[in-house]
Image: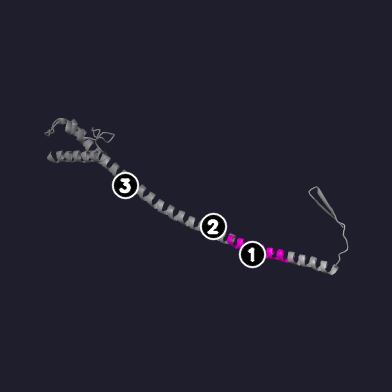
């Protein structure tokens, strides 16, 4: 009896010399038992592999569903966060516009009295009373500089705004005394 196997360029050959079996019926039964046992083992392995494949398939479907759910939740979260961010951003923009409008209004209100004072400064028949106190204090607090310091390097914008409001108040009093 001979057997030949060829794969990827390798050739295997087996040769056996067979002799008649002393008990041919028993030998045939043993060969069939061996083949039946091998068949049962292979069938059980196929069942195990099939069950494992089904479990993996089910887990893959669950993972896919979970991934889709996570993507949906992520998109919803991002949309909600973006919406909240836009709301905060718009409120900040609105607040900045209001502050800019206030600054513009204060600057325009500050410019009008300066123009009137310049007109008053050109007339020769009026004199302004000098308030008591040092001239330095009057100059420092009277007009804020362009940097907002009011002449004082340690002054804050709030102090400058207060000084400007105070100087506007003095100007208003000067006009009422006329």
Query: Do residues under tags 2 and 1 come within 8 Å of each other at their CB atoms?
Result: no
Q: What separation in Å lies between label 2 and label 1 (alpha carbons)?
A: 24 Å
Residue 71 spot, x, y in % from top left: 52, 56
C-alpha gap between disc 3 and disc 1: 70 Å
Q: Position of residue 168 (x, y in %)?
A: 20, 40
Which of the two discs, 3 and 2, labels the residue nearer the N terminus?
2
Is 156 in front, or is 131? 156
What label does residue 51 carry, if any?
1
Check residue 12 in the rendering and tell me which mark sits there, or answer none.
none
Badge 3: residue crowd in 10 Å (few <14, some 14–19, many ≥20): few
Q: CA distance from mark 3 to mark 2?
A: 46 Å
Q: Which residues are magenta?
A: 39-59
Q: Secondary structure at mark 1?
A: helix
Q: Are marks 3 and 2 in contact (CB under 8 Å)?
A: no
Q: Is tag 2's residue or tag 1's residue first in the polypeptide sequence?
A: 1
- Check disc 2 and report the residue beneath it: 67
Closer to the observer: label 3 or label 2? Answer: 2
Q: Quadrant of the C terminus?
A: top left
**Residue 152 quadrant:** top left
The prevailing secondary structure element of the residues shown in magenta is: helix
Residue in the foreground of this view, choosing between 94 and 33: 33
* Residue 52 inside the magenta-drawn segment: yes
Question: Residue placed at 82% from the left, 66% from the top?
Answer: 27
Which of the 4 quarters of the picture holds residue 23? bottom right
State the residue at coordinates (82%, 68%). 26
- Name the residue tied to disc 3: 98
Residue nearer the viewer, 76 or 163? 76
Camera-side mark, 3 or 1: 1
């Amino acid at each position: 009896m001979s057997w030949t196997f060829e794969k990827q360029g390798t050739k295997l050959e087996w040769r056996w010399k067979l002799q008649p079996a002393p008990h041919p019926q028993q030998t045939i039964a043993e060969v069939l038992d061996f083949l039946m046992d091998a068949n049962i083992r292979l069938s059980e392995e196929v069942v195990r592999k099939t069950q494992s494949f089904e479990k993996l398939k089910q887990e893959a479907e669950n993972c896919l569903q979970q991934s889709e759910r996570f993507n949906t939740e992520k998109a919803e979260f991002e949309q909600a966060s973006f919406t909240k961010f836009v709301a905060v951003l718009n409120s900040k923009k609105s607040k900045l516009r209001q502050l800019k409008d206030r600054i513009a209004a204060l600057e325009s209100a500050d410019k009008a009295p300066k123009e009137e004072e310049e007109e008053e400064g050109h007339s020769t028949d009026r004199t302004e009373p000098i308030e008591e106190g040092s001239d330095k204090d009057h100059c420092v607090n009277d007009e804020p500089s362009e940097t907002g310091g009011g002449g004082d390097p340690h002054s804050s914008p709030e102090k400058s705004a207060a000084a400007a409001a105070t100087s506007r108040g003095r100007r208003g009093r000067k006009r009422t005394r006329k």
